Image (cartoon, rainbow, N blue to C red):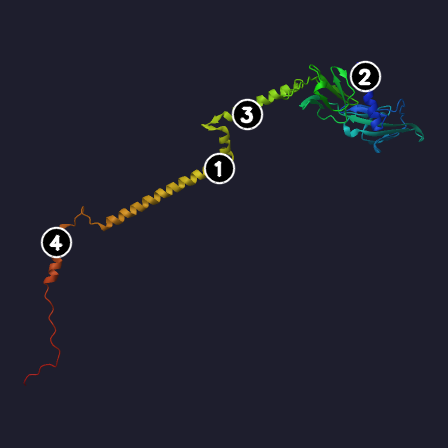
């Protein structure tokens, strides 16, 4: 308990001298903050002014409120509910009486911070030694302290390096991160490094992470092993997404080509058979006998017709005796 109190006082002193703001009022994000006049009370006819970084956020003169960006209570204290980091800055309040005389003035610096998150000690085995890193998410502008076997060390760095000879079997380490409003410590770890390779115990965090990673990899392998219609699932996905369109189009083109080729081949064969049939006599259908006799008779009658007389020799007509 005494060590925690000492650590908190040390943190406040360090931040006080590093920022140069000894009167800063610290608050966590989401809290309610009241900036008061330290005992002064507001009368009904008084004039009240509040500014945030020289920007007026409240102004009342007598019973008339002219500016009300933030609320005030009966005593004139400024009230900030669910405060956020953008509300950090200088707040100045002034009270005048009805005659314009100064009654009370206050200037306060507000610093809104986020609570620190729980850190983790990361162990890395290196040649002839070990590295320890105090890691935490979203922890900025924080102080770091280390403990070895439950005893606070003098180190305030987030990174430590130890030689193999400086670490004994069973030694445990932990780190603490803190700011003016919160403080959290990591789980203890027992680093164990050897020349053969890396072996480090970083609490149960890394074990759980590795177990979850292995489980996720096995689930992925099971998914890849599944088949759909006799094909691997990944192949079906490729066919359905992009490759399937090209494959279906290729199949359609191939089917059309085969049908056209067969049609043209069948048509050419039919034409060739037709030409051969027209050139060969038809023995299956002999001509009609009666029709043939009629044709022969007509030809014979034409051949038996008398020939026309031959014309006589041309010359003058023959004149006989009178």
Q: Dividing the image into 4 quarters, which one contains the N terminus?
A: top right
Q: CA distance from mark 4 to mark 2?
A: 145 Å
Secondary structure, mark 1, is helix
Q: CA distance from mark 2 to mark 3?
A: 50 Å
Q: CA distance from mark 1 to mark 2?
A: 71 Å
Tell whether label 2 touches label 1 (CB within 8 Å).
Answer: no
Tell whether label 3 touches label 4 (CB within 8 Å).
Answer: no
How packed mark 3 is, by other alpha carbons closer than 10 Å (few <14, some 14-19, many 20 or more), is few
User: Disc 1 designates what residue?
Assistant: 245
Secondary structure, mark 2, is helix
Q: Nearer the viewer, mark 1 or mark 4?
A: 1
Among numbered discs 1 and 2, the one appearing first in the sequence: 2
Q: Between residues 144 and 236, which one lies in front from this camera angle?
A: 144
Among numbered discs 2 and 3, the one appearing first in the sequence: 2
Q: Nearer the viewer, mark 4 or mark 2?
A: 2
Image spot of residue 102 (x, y percent): 93, 29
User: Disc 3 designates what residue?
Assistant: 220
Q: Is residue 203 left or right of residue 5?
A: left
Tell whether label 3 touches label 1 (CB within 8 Å).
Answer: no
Q: Residue 174, relative to residue 63: is it above or below?
A: above
């Amino acid at each position: 308990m005494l060590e925690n109190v000492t650590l908190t006082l040390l943190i406040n002193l360090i931040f006080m001298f590093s920022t140069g703001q000894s009167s800063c009022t610290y608050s966590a994000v989401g809290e309610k903050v009241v900036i008061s006049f330290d005992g002064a009370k507001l009368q009904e006819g008084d004039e009240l002014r509040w500014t945030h970084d020289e920007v007026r956020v409240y102004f009342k003169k007598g019973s008339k409120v002219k500016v009300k960006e933030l609320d005030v209570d009966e005593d004139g204290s400024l009230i900030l509910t669910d405060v956020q980091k953008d509300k950090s800055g200088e707040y100045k309040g002034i009270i005048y009486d009805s005659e314009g005389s100064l009654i009370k003035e206050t200037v306060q610096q507000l610093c809104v911070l986020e609570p620190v998150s729980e850190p983790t000690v990361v162990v890395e085995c290196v040649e002839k030694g070990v590295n320890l890193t105090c890691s935490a998410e979203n922890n900025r502008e924080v102080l770091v302290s280390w403990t070895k076997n439950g005893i606070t060390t003098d180190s305030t760095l987030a990174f430590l390096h130890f030689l193999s000879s400086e670490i004994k079997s069973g030694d445990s380490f932990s780190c603490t991160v803190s700011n003016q409003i919160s403080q959290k410590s990591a789980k203890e770890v027992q680093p164990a490094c050897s020349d053969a390779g890396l072996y480090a115990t970083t609490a149960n965090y890394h074990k759980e992470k590795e177990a979850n990673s292995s489980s996720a990899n096995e689930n992925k392998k099971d998914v890849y092993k599944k088949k759909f219609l006799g094909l691997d699932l990944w192949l079906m996905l490729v066919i359905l997404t992009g490759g399937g369109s090209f494959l279906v189009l290729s199949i359609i083109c191939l089917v059309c080509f085969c049908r056209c080729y067969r049609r043209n081949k069948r048509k050419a064969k039919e034409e060739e058979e037709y030409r051969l049939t027209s050139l060969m006599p038809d023995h299956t259908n002999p001509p009609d006998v009666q029709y043939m006799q009629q044709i022969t008779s007509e030809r014979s009658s034409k051949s038996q017709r008398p020939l026309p007389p031959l014309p006589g020799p041309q010359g003058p007509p023959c004149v006989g005796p009178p």
